Image: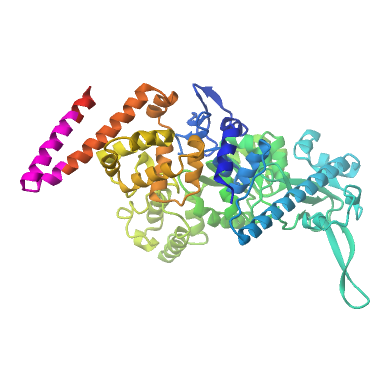
Amino acid sequence: MIPPSFIDDLLQRVDVADVVGQYVSLKKSGANYSGLCPFHTEKSPSFTVSPTKQFYHCFGCGAHGTAVGFLMEHLGLSFPQSVEELANRVGLQVPQEVNSANAQADSSDRQAKSDLKSRLHSHLLEAARYYQRRLKDSPQAIDYLKGRGISGETAKRFHIGYAPAGWQGLQSVFSDYSNPELEQAGLVIAGQGESAEGQVVEAKRYDRFRNRIMFPILSPRGEVIGFGARAMGDEQPKYLNSPETPVFSKGSGLYGLYEARAAIRDAGEVWVVEGYMDVVMLSQFGLGQAVATLGTATTEEHLRLLSRQSGRLVFMFDGDTAGRKAAARALETSLAFASEKFQIRFAFLPQGHDPDSLARQKGKEAVEEAARSATALSEFVLQHAADDQDLRLAEGRAAAAAQVRRLFALMPNSELKRQILLQACQRFQVDPSSLGVASARSNQTSLRPKPRQGRPASGGAIAGLPASKTFSLGDRLLQFLVRCPAWLDDIAQHPDARRILGALSEAQQAVYSFIQDNRSRAGFAGLFEAAAQQSDSLAMQLFKSLARPDPGIDDLLEDSASEEARREFERLQNRLLLAALQRESDELTAVANPDALQKLRQLHQRMVDLKQSLIQ
């Protein structure tokens, strides 16, 4: 476990504007920076970064967090990976809290795995440099790339190389060719033989990749994690990928993603193609927003990664039967991610063409037109359901409806799902109940999109919390405390602190206690990261809502010692106190005895005084 104190120190050392600025074009806007949001497609900037609070927020899609959270969302890193990445940037070593012998063993194991991955990355990088150097020495490889239309500049941009035909070419790179880590990195194969005693022993070691064009595969952070190797002749297999290793998995990696990040942001969408050469050639034609899966069908892990890059995704498939089948598989995997915020489309290229050949023979415009005319997921669902069915017949419509019902089960409840439901009912002439839904009208509420996990529903309301006047006052008070935890002392020293806190809702009281327990964390960013490590409770949802940028408060607090901000905070305390006194007054009114009457008079006088102070 990473100590919270280290997270606080790290967030104080890194500049969130510098971190975000590596991936987003930011412009100074007053005390903050603004730019186009990297998490959804937009034309006008709604994404802000606050260096003073070390926090980013998008007013369009609600994405928000610290530098740690940004790397997790944008690069798909885990929390420890994100912390490690930031620590490396500022020259810090990530410590681990050790609470027991088992924890110490787990920590040592994690460290050993991390160290191994670092060494494997280093081996792979050395191999990539070697292959790139050897490309210059191979007229055959150079002629092949020229024949495919790839320029020297493009080859350099994608670090394309050549693996010589010899069996142990990498021996000139690694002094210890017998190092088992070369095998773990997928660079070397250790053959097996049999001893005189009949035991299996290691035989000759040899390079995995020989006489092939080499395409290094990079992680979202730019580390070499594996290779795609293409034969130049009729050798089989035509493409040979790195095996599964501690740093490489075909089901989660995407070729060209690291190189495509800027182009994806500029284009506002990401294209998924099937081959490395498609990615390279499209980039050469100025269409750098393409990535490729690594010889596998699209997986959920791919879609999670892609959804972080852009709000629009276009799959590109050959127009033949095989391409249609591949598109159908991609559709079914995509349904779990489909929503009005993540638009997915399917482009089918002219017969006999892949993106590479279409760009070379018909030009950039032909590929762009294919992307523009791509079929929306909402329509492709219905087309796929109706495949091979005669919709003029009741039997055909019934079979299509059954297929839609199966596909609907793969989709989350959302407005998009509701709209597809309405279209399906009309096209297949069925009642919503035939599709597993009670009715389009009665199900409208249940199909309404749920708020993104860890964020409040639109409009700032939190499901399950009362939207009363007292709740609004409590929210406002807590917004100040989220930004200025030291102001907790003002409430603690208030003579009616018990009543003020009693006027808060249960969730608000939980947020107050959380701020109190974590007030030692370094500022706003540290407090937010502490919240990010909590379970997604109602209180933590409320905290994240309160942490969102609010010009009304943020402008007031530009100077934390501002007298106006202090006065507003004091007024909020008094208004909450007034609400608490009013509740006590209502309770005493129902009690008929002299003592209650005397207390009621005192309460009313106190309330009059408070109201008078509030209007001054």
Residue 542: name its quadrant. top left
Q: Is residue 179 left or right of residue 287?
A: right
Image coordinates for residue 39, horizontal then vertical, percent: 53, 39
Q: Residue lying furthest bottom in this view?
A: 197
Camera-side residue of 287 and 244: 244
Residue 80: horizontal and vertical position, in percent? 61, 48
Residue 237 figure quarter: bottom right
Q: Please state if 484 lies on the left or on the right of 337 as rendered.
A: left
Task: Examine the residues drawn in magenta and state their main secondary structure.
Answer: helix
Image coords of residue 114 (percent x, y)? 69, 51
Residue 401 visible in rendering: yes
Q: Which residues are magenta?
A: 585-609
Relative to 39, say whether 537 is above or below: below
Q: In this orientation, which residue lies closer to the viewer: 33 or 501?
A: 501
How is the rendered protein coloured? rainbow
Q: Is residue 606 above or below residue 77?
A: above
In the picture provided, is 280 more to the left or to the right than 22? right
- Residue 525 is a magenta residue: no
> Seen in the image, is 454 located left or right of residue 111?
left
Tell me which residue sits at (66%, 49%) in the image.
351
Q: Residue at x 40, y 64 (%)?
A: 394
Q: Which residue is depicted at the point 58% across and 51% down?
A: 1
Image x and y of residue 477, in percent: 34, 35
Say if residue 14 shows up in the picture: no
In reply to whether residue 595 is colored magenta, the answer given is yes
Q: Between 293 and 463, which is closer to the camera in this rendering?
A: 463
